Structure formats: C-alpha cells, structure tokens
Image: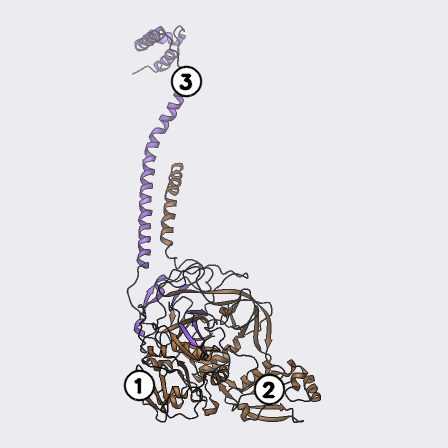
Chain colours: A brown, B purple
Amino acid sequence: MKVLRTITRRLALSAGPLLLCVCVMGQTPAPSPRRPLPQVRTKPGDRRAAPQVVTIVHRLNALKMFRLLARSEQQAQAIAGFESAFNLVDDVHTNVSAGVAMDDGETIAAWLPEAEVEFGPPAFPQAGIDVKPPTWPDTPNTDFKERFFETPDVSVIGPDGKQLLAKYVGFDATTGLSILKLTRKGLLPPAPIKDEPLGVGENVLLFGPEPVTPAPSLVNNSLYVRIGSIEGRIQNVLSAPTGEISRLRVSAAKLSQANIGGVAVNEAGDTIGIVDGLEGNQATVLPTASIRRAAQRVLEQQASVPRPWLGVRGEAVSTLKLDQIQSQGWTMDRAAELAGKHRGIMLTSVVPDSPAARADLRAGDVILTVDNKEIQKAEDFTWWLEQAGSSNLVHFTVARPDRVSEETMDVKLSGSLDPAAGWLNFRKRLLPAKGLSLLDHGIETIALRPGVATQLGITAGLLVVYVEPNTPAFEAGLKPGDVIQSIDGQPLSTLNGVPSPKTLSTLQVVRKKEKLTIDLAKPAKNE
Amino acid sequence: MKDTRCEPVRRELEELTLNEAFSDSTSEHLSSCAECREFQRQQMKLRQIVSSLGTVNAPADFDFRLRARLAADSQRPSFRYWSFAVKGLATVAVLVVFGVGVVVVWQRGHEQAPIAKTQPPQTPAGPKQPERHQTIPAPAPEVTPTIAINNEPKRKADRSFVVRPKRSLTAVVDLSSERANIISNTMPALNTGTIFPIDASLQSLRVSLDDGRGNARTISFPTVSFGSQRVLTNANQFAPKGVW
C-alpha cells in the first residue's frame, strides 16, 4: 500500500501540471459554452448588460447634409464650393445612437438627432396642402433619387454585434422617437419594461454606444463601437395632469450630448425610459409609457405621425410679471386679476394662416382650458394638445384683453413632422436673407455659386435638396439633386432677390448634366 | 535404526566447551555407541583447531558500515523494481495526457477556423445595395461579466460580419453612386463588452459657404457623431419650449 501511495503521489505531481497546462491551452482561445455564467454584480457602479439596448446607425448623404445646412441657423445663402471627391449621394455623416427593444422583441424605439432631416414640413399653410406624411415602401427602389424619399438609411445592430434586418416604420413627432420594426421575431430577447411607479433615489444606468478608446477611431474605414453605460440616480419624477409620469430627471456625472438617446435601465435590468434632453447635470428621461404610446401611434398608422400643431408661441401666465402681461394689451386691474389666478397660457405670437390664426386667436389671448381641463403650466398645455392629436378639434376657453367675459372656441389642430417647428424660423430667415424661395411650393433649395456649379456641369442655379411629397412639384417629377436654372422661362439671375413666386408653371433643371423641363401642371409618369 | 538417545547426547557434545566434562549419561552412551564417539572426536578436533587461531580486531566503523550495508542490501531489490515501474507508468501517463491535450487543442483550432459558408445578405433598412453585404459566420464575442445577464457565452461561430468592398471616391459627380455599407469586419471582444465595427466615411465633407454679403467661410461636417450630438451645433433643437 505504501508503494501504491508513492506511485499515486508521483503521478499526480508529474502529470497534474501537464494536464493543467494542456487544459489552459485548450480553453484560452474560446471559453467553453458550459463555462458558468459570470456573476452579475449588483452594487452601484458596476457595468451590467442590457440586452434590450441596440445600436442604431443613421447615415446622411451630402444632399441631406446640404438640406440640414440650409435649415440651420448658419448664414448660408449659397454653397461656394465643396470637394469634388464627394458625390451628392455619398454618405458623409454617420450618427450612432442607442435604441431600445420593446417588450414584444421586435419593435425598436430610438431618438435619432437628425431624423427630421428625412422629412419635410408637411404643411405649407399658404399653399393649403394637407398633412400627408410619407410612408416607406417595403422594397427599396433602385433609383437613388426615388430612394431619397424612401426609408431613411437606418440600420440596427444587436447587443451581440450582429446586424438585424429592420424596417423604418415612422417618426413620432410628438416625442421625437423613430420607430423601427425587426423583420423577424425572436432576434432579440423580450426585454422587461418597468411600468410600476418609480421612486426618487433609485439607481439607474444610462446605456448608449460609445467609441472604443484608446483604439484608433478609424481602422480600415471602420469605427469600433461598444455599448457603454454611466451611472445615474433619479432625482425627480414629474407628473402629467393625469397623474402619470411625464418625465424623469436623472442626475449623473459626465453627462454629455452623447447620452441623449441613451436607454435608462434600472438595477433589475428593466427599461425605464429614453434620455431625451439635458438640463445642467441632469438628464430628462422620456418614460416607458410615453414610448409605448409613440410606438403605438406609429405602428397603427404604419407611417410617421405628426405632432399636433396650433401655430402659436406663448408662456404660462404664472411665469409672467405684471408688466409683461400689460405689454400684451391687458389693463392694470385685469392683468393683476389674471396674474393672481395663476392659470392659462398667454399667447405672444400667432403664425399667419395657422390653425390658431384661422380660429382668430391673437397675441395677448390667454388659453385657460383645453377640452375643459384647466391649464396652469406650459407642460399641461403641451400634454393636453398631445392627447388631442393632430387633425382633431380641441375646445378652448379663452380670456382676451379686450373682452371682459371668457370665450369658448373650437380649433382644428394641424400637424407637423418637424418637432421643433424649425421650418417657421427657416422661412423667416430664408425670405429676407436668401431672396428667392420656393418653400411655399414644397421645394427646398440652396443656391450654388458658379465655382461649385461647374462640378455639376452647369453655370449656377438652385440645388434642390428636398421636395415635399404630394406637392405639384413632387408629382411633376422634381427630385433632390436637380439644379433649377430657370423658373417659368426666366433665368435665376434675373429672379434673384425678388420675393417668392406665387405661382409656378415650369422649371428648367439640370439632372445628370442633362437639361429637363418640368411642367408642374403635368404629373410625371412613374419611372 | 538410530538410538533415540543419540540426539540429546550429540546436542550436549555441541554445546560443551573445550575443557568441560561429559555428564554421566553421555559417558555411558558414548561407551556403547561408536557413531556418537566419532561425532565427539570430530567436535573436539574442530574446537582445538578454532582455539589455535589468533584474534582479529574489527575496524572502528565496522558496526556502522555493517548496519548501512545491511540496510542497503535489504532495500536494493525493491528499489530497483518499483523505480522501473514508476518511470514506466509516469511516461505512459504523460503520453496519455499529452495526447488528450493535442486532441482538445486540435478540436479548438478546428472550431475557430473561418467558415467559408455564406449566409443570406443582411441588408439594412435603408436603400442599400444588398449584394454589397456578405455575411459570414465568425466567432462570437467573449461574454464578460460586464455584459452578461441571461446571456450564455456564445460560440464564436455564431457571430457574423459583413465584408464590404472598398469605396472609391471619384472626382465626377455621379448621382447614381452607391452608399457606404454598414458592418465590415469583427474585432475580438475586450473586457468591457461586445465591440463591433461600423463603416464610416474617412473624409470629412468641407463646404464653403457664402453668406450673401461677400463673406465666405468653410464648414467641416464631422464624419461620425454619437447620441444626439448634432451635425451643426446651432441646428434647431428638439421641442423648444413655448412653441405649440
């Protein structure tokens, strides 16, 4: 027995390390699937996974960038030049944002910062065009110009780095969320969504894609990305007039614009919302109930859903000083009475030919109730208008500076796919500063100086960056990328600086170095 | 037949010293037994010879050397046997272990080898050219503690990447140009989560703008932005307050 023990001991001593080495060599390149799952750490500060967080890649080509440039506050009357190496339809910008998979495992909501550049202002009040949001076909068209009107160039990458086939369903202008749907179920695990009340002080993690550092940012045309997270804590829970959560405020260190669009997940791994803004060192989080409603709106329509639009600017009376109320035409006594009640929204301006203007609402009017719901804060007004929805009637109770008694009126809301209503400012800037405008005809352009125009085989002109669907110009076949050289037979040089033409009959354009005449009275044949 | 008294008599004869006298019974037997007398004569002669030899002194370490020799002699036969057995068994064990290791390593290497099988292309939602997306199964990323919730570590063969041809920039404005693709190659996972590549333009678009008053300036668009970092910093912000 002693000898046997000796043999055993000697074998163990000599073969053990060898066996260990061999096993380690075999295991290092790829962990065994049977390896136990890593422990999930629960203490604050730990990074944890969020299988419901996906990465959304949104690409913009040069034409869309020019459109963005024209609509921005940049003083850009014309393009004087750009590098000839770029094609107008080349992808020149890539936005990488987070998206959250809903609990059905196939619907994805994401806050894409440049989503509105894919859409036009749907309503041109002067032209009397109804809201008809574009819908996206299932099958991409092979013609690049047709593609411009098709689904935005958006891709989904799953938590494991795999690209997932998804369709862009639409844009919800009320929340600013883009809604996508995976073409197959089961590509993502169903992710729990927390619908129970949230408490102040709860720890959350804000997930979002981030570049991998310190690795080179671009290697072989590729940017390496991963889903990162930062810690946060719920500081405030804001309630809507109905009592449900309207926003969460989350404090976190190292917040930046890159965190907007990030997915907020609690310690249990449940989705609690999407970051939709920053206020100081706090992030505002759109709660899951609002995300659900946005997805439901878009999925029901299978198209983008406009935001209810009234066409006014204003402030809550409770935030105004007495002299500010008086400056809107209110007498001292009535201004004091109004301020004492802390109710209503005072209109400071009304957009001409907007739903508000058509209902005879004026600056100085105070909207006291919406559908018999008292309004005290600006958030209340926003909430009830959103509940009413675009293209629907709302019932207002209005106090006016020149009327003693309150009035009631019904107003049919319009809609806007531009959540910031930025096109109103765009129009204001464009008309005086940039002269000729075809905006009222649903055509967005930016002027080309001769130097850059020669790159397109022309002398000068207006580069079309967007054509509103369902307009005569769209139906006649005008497309982004066309360069307008004359309008109704008059060269642009003779029209420059004159007000926007009231009517349009024909446009002479250059397309692929070929001159075309587009008759706006004749819809183009399907290509 | 031998007399039964011979044996005790001879034992007594062996034990007697050289000058010691016989007992009476032994003397009586010797007188009647010729064989025992001969045995007695030989014993006496042997004793006389031995007693005539000189004395030999042992060396001082004789006892130690004797004991060591005895100990060594007592162990030598078993050591030789078991040493051979141990060496043989150890060699066999090492060979077996090495063989198992080789098989394991070979299997691992076989699993990691690129698989040339092509999956159906995964086109993005956007209007991309499907033929430019060639999806190839590749090893899955290593799941680390930072990303694992209900995630079984995946086999590397599960992961896919898309091979993307190089995009060439031309000096001609060709409005039928294709767009860039999305996913290209894969990179081994680091310790902080799944890492994946995204194709991005290498070159920033620079545009010269004319403000209409004779002032020109150049704007360079970033090729990539994360989150809501807008392309133009003063672009219209989402949902400005006080606008309905």
Which disc number belongs to residue A335?
none
Specify whether A419 is left or right of A342: left
Instruction: Please give the chain letter of the residue carrying mark 1.
Output: A
Q: Which is more toward the observer, A141 or B86?
A: A141
* Residues beneath discs 1 and 3 located on the same chain: no
Label 1 vs label 2: CA separation?
49 Å
Badge 1 amino acid? Lys
From the viewer's perspective, is the residue at label 2 or at label 3 nearer?
2
x and y, in percent, of residue A39 in the image: 48, 59
Reading the image, the residue beneath label 1 is A515
Instruction: Please give the chain letter of the residue carrying mark 3.
Output: B
Label 2 vs label 3: CA separation?
123 Å
Helix, strand or loop for disc 2: strand
Does the rendering let one see residue B120?
no
* Residues beneath discs 1 and 2 located on the same chain: yes
Label 1 vs label 3: CA separation?
124 Å
Does the rendering let one see residue A350?
yes
Badge 3 amino acid? Asp
From the viewer's perspective, is the residue at label 1 or at label 2 nearer?
1
x and y, in percent, of residue A38 in the image: 46, 59
Instruction: Please give the chain letter of the residue carrying mark 2.
Output: A
Q: Earlier in the sequence, mark 1 or mark 2?
A: 2
Reading the image, the residue beneath label 3 is B61
